[in-house]
Image (cartoon, rainbow, N blue to C red):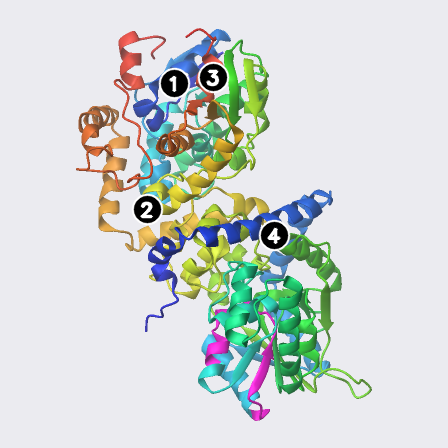
Amino acid sequence: MKELFSPRWFKSRASESLPDEALRRNIERATETALKKRADVVGAFPEWESYRTAARAVKEHVLENLSSYLASFEEHARANGSTVLYARDGVEACALVMDIVLSAGTRTVVKSKSMTSEEIGLSAALGRSGIQAVETDLGEYIVQLAGEPPSHITAPALHKSRRDIGRLFEQKLGLPYSDEPETLTAVARSVLRDRFFEAGVGISGVNFGLADSGAICVVENEGNARMATTLPPVHIALMGVEKLLPDMRCLALFLDMLARSATGQRLSSYTSIIRGPKRADEWDGPDVLYIIILDNGRTDIFADSRFRSVLSCIRCGACLNVCPVYRVVGGHAYGSAYPGPIGAVLAPFFHGKEDGRHLPYASSLCGACAEICPVRIDIPRLLLLHRGETVRERRAPLIERFLMKAYACVVKRPALYALTGHLLRAFAPLATDEHGLLRIPTRAKTRTFPAPAEKTFREIWKEEGIGST
Amino acid sequence: MKVSLFIPCLTDLFFPSTAWSVVRVLERLGIDVVYDPRQTCCGQPAFNTGYHRDAVVCAEHFLDVFHEAECIVAPSGSCVAMIRDYSSGMLRLPDRYRRLAERLKDRVWEFTSFLVDHLGVTEVDAEFPGRVALHDSCHALRLLGIRAQPRALLKRVRGLELVELGRTGVCCGFGGTFAVKFADISTEIGKEKIRDILDAQVRTVTAVDSSCLMQIDGLLRKTGSTTTTVHIADILASTGQP
């Protein structure tokens, strides 16, 4: 079954969003603010580059020793009273969540922001069984009200202006229009407050799992995750298997990197380190804590050493903010839970090589993503590797394959190469945009293309013969 | 010192005068310039589109032509970055070529980096009056660390007022075959660049790569702006005489 929200349709979705001037300005405002704040706190942090190196080294170390860290995490988590479950893929994970929710006998669950739950389509799966999953992160709540997927990893409603949100609240909640952030936040707060009390289950993601203590760490700025993980009697934490860290010391490093990269903060407003469910002598917290550890293709990524580094990603979203392509097409065009450069690397793994093949090409390879990545993932290189795979597996367009063969054939034959210069010049008038015959599709109506020079450099050099070898 | 010129295909076909500017600046500094007409393309179009086997063919040809060169200079950061990447393992070169590529890596230079980093020259006795904005070409900037070098050179050009764009280090949207495959997106990214350029109110935009300038120029012409694009080699070769 081909889903509608798929990277397969990137090109057509992008051409829908490109002319949207309002969208462009919303994205620009949000990303510029985030980048400016980030630049301030990173600039004031002289150890940044060495922290990046250290963070990457920690991640690689964990990945290389994943089974022992996983065993340790599981052992400690169980000792703390948590239940650890494993899900091979999204379907299994959703089924596990469903079982827990149904046996808890509730119809309402509250969710705090979790990209992993987006990845596996959890809310939709719950909805199909008549269970209402209420998003409690403000941005997530907004996109849920609008019936849209998030458009950014850390700022789900980044594509909306406050006026858009005001109108949405007016329409969906039947309230008088306001675009004051304080008013809108207060509205969401009061609506969600009841949901927190009503819900039988709270679902969260996990930013980091600590192998030496079995604790999980959830980072947020609104306090909703703390409520979702403590108020309902059951807490389900959904964790990608790559989220493990060895210990608390490493956590300190990553909290620093994540907050600075994602939101330009020195530390996020709420950092919850959850050791397990409520103990006998405690008042607060859930009675049960399920930790679902999700693979969903991560082992396959790990198995291919060329791509392994992508598992170091901490989902900060900085590469989206800085990506020129993301900034003009917006997150929805990608048709994947993970948009932007990192999403383009993940797409062939999460959506299959056929549907995912366009995204690695949707990059000018400018390298801004690699430059900003807190864990030094060389995203352009990974995109190139994907492109190489696409060509190797003959998924590239036939005409392109032919042209590239012809190109390579010309490049290794200087005489033929020189002749191509002549031909190009002869046929150039047909390709300029005033004559439309062979209008170079690339430049269409929006750009002019230079005419070839009257003589190539090699021709002039030959005639003048200066210093020629 | 003897320098072997590498003139990338785009420069050869569309901007031969830029290649001449490189020759003039180098000769002005007393350097012997040689040009081997067997040279063709570095292979980047194939490599960046995923045709790694075809890129190997290009790399082997390049290495056949240049492996004995003492010093290779090219007016493009992007092509130089590609050549320096030949030995990184992304391309599966046969061992013999891999070794040639490894040895050649440190002898191939982008033009402004060659002047500043290798020769230690920032004064080339050039004159080019007016306000000039420098666009940082992504591959030069991020793969070769070229940021200060062109600025140092431009600051010594008589009459030239160097203007920084509102946002530096942002892509022009060209991206090689990306500009063909995703023409609309490439254009829109470029338009954002044009906004910054128009805001800067400059006479000229310059860069170390002709490919970026081609993208920028193609868009500028559609706006009716009188701002022109000039490769940095052309500025450095200029003596102020028309």
Evaluate if marks 4 and 2 touch, with contact meaning CB atoms under 8 Å apart: no
Q: Mark 3 vs mark 1: give the one in front.
A: 3
Secondary structure state at the residue bearing disc 2: helix
The correct choice, above or below, for A393 with respect to A144 in the image is above
Mark 3 Cα shell of 10 Å, populated few (<14), some (14-19), many (≥20):
many
Give percent across and percent down for residue A50.
69, 45
Q: Mark 4 vs mark 2: give the one in front.
A: 2
Q: Mark 1 vs mark 4: give the one in front.
A: 1
The answer to whether marks 3 and 1 sit on the same chain is yes
Asked if residue A121 is among those painted magenta in the image, a careful observer would answer yes
Mark 1 Cα shell of 10 Å, populated few (<14), some (14-19), many (≥20):
many
Circle 2 is placed at which residue position? B181
Q: Which mark is residue A375?
A: 4
Q: Which mark is residue B235?
A: 3
Give percent across and percent down for residue A231.
70, 82
Q: Residue at x 61, y 70 (%)?
A: A137
Q: CA distance from mark 3 to mark 1?
A: 12 Å
Dot 1 amino acid type: Ala
Secondary structure state at the residue bearing disc 4: loop
Q: Mark 3 vs mark 4: give the one in front.
A: 3
Circle 1 is placed at which residue position? B19
Q: N-terminal of the two: label 2 or label 3?
A: 2
Q: Residue at x 33, y 40 (%)?
A: B46
Q: Quadrant of residue B191?
A: top left
Q: CA distance from mark 3 to mark 4?
A: 39 Å
Dot 4 amino acid type: Val
